[in-house]
């Protein structure tokens, strides 16, 4: 299965934890360089979300902008079937899936229906397993069939 990166986001290290859309992110084993959460938790270093999640919110008449779900990488294919230990490749970067994204209180503050709606469809966490590299908007995303 193959897709592409639609958008990239980092969380800035300011009081409001401002989300910023950027065209390229630099990554290494500690996560996304320049992101507030860099080197905090390797198992939750990068959050990948599918456009599918936003389509699901729109179908349920909940209008949220890209980046609202906390993702670092928004892609155009659905990776939520991947299990911990499986990998996906984005450009030259190899990521290992570590866990499904748990729901947080922040989602219910946006809309009370969001936590239940996105229970299994908010995103997946991954860690970088091939050293320092970068990911750009429009990079190809490859999910290996297992």
Image (spheres, helix red, strand yellow):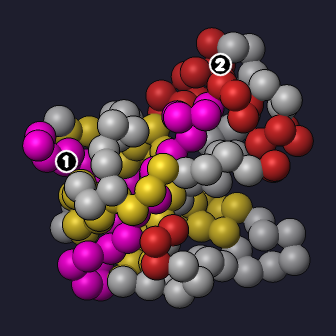
- Residue to which mark 1 is pinned: 142
Q: Which residues are magenta?
A: 118-146
First along the sequence among labels 1 and 2:
2
- Describe residue 101's horizontal placement relative to residue 128 as left or right: right
Residue at image location 66% in from the left, 63% down from the top? 20
In this picture, is 37 found above or below 95? Answer: below
**Residue 23 located within the stretch drawn in magenta:** no
Which secondary structure, mark 2? helix
Disc 1 residue crowd, few under 14, some 14–19, many 20+, Cα 10 Å: some
Q: CA distance from mark 1 to mark 2?
A: 26 Å
Residue at image location 11% in from the left, 43% down from the top? 146
User: Image quadrant for the N terminus?
Assistant: top left
State the image coordinates of residue 106 (x, y, percent, origin top left): 81, 49
In this picture, is 12 found above or below 68? Answer: below
Residue at image location 69% in from the left, 14% down from the top? 60
Tally the marks: 2
Tell me, yes or no, if residue 8 can be seen here.
no
The mark found on residue 58 in the picture is: 2
């Amino acid at each position: 299965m193959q897709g592409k990166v639609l958008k990239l986001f980092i969380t800035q290290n300011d009081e409001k934890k401002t989300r910023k859309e950027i065209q390229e992110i630099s990554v290494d084993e500690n996560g996304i360089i320049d992101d507030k959460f860099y080197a905090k938790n390797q198992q939750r270093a990068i959050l990948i979300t599918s456009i599918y999640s936003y389509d699901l919110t729109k179908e349920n008449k909940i209008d949220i902008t890209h980046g609202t779900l906390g993702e670092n990488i928004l892609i155009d294919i659905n990776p939520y079937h991947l299990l911990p230990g499986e990998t996906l490749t984005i450009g030259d970067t190899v990521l290992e899936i570590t866990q499904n994204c748990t729901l947080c209180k922040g989602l219910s503050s946006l809309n009370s229906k969001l936590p239940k709606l996105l229970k299994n469809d908010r995103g997946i966490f991954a860690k970088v397993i091939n050293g320092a590299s970068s990911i750009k908007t429009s990079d190809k995303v490859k999910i290996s069939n297992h």
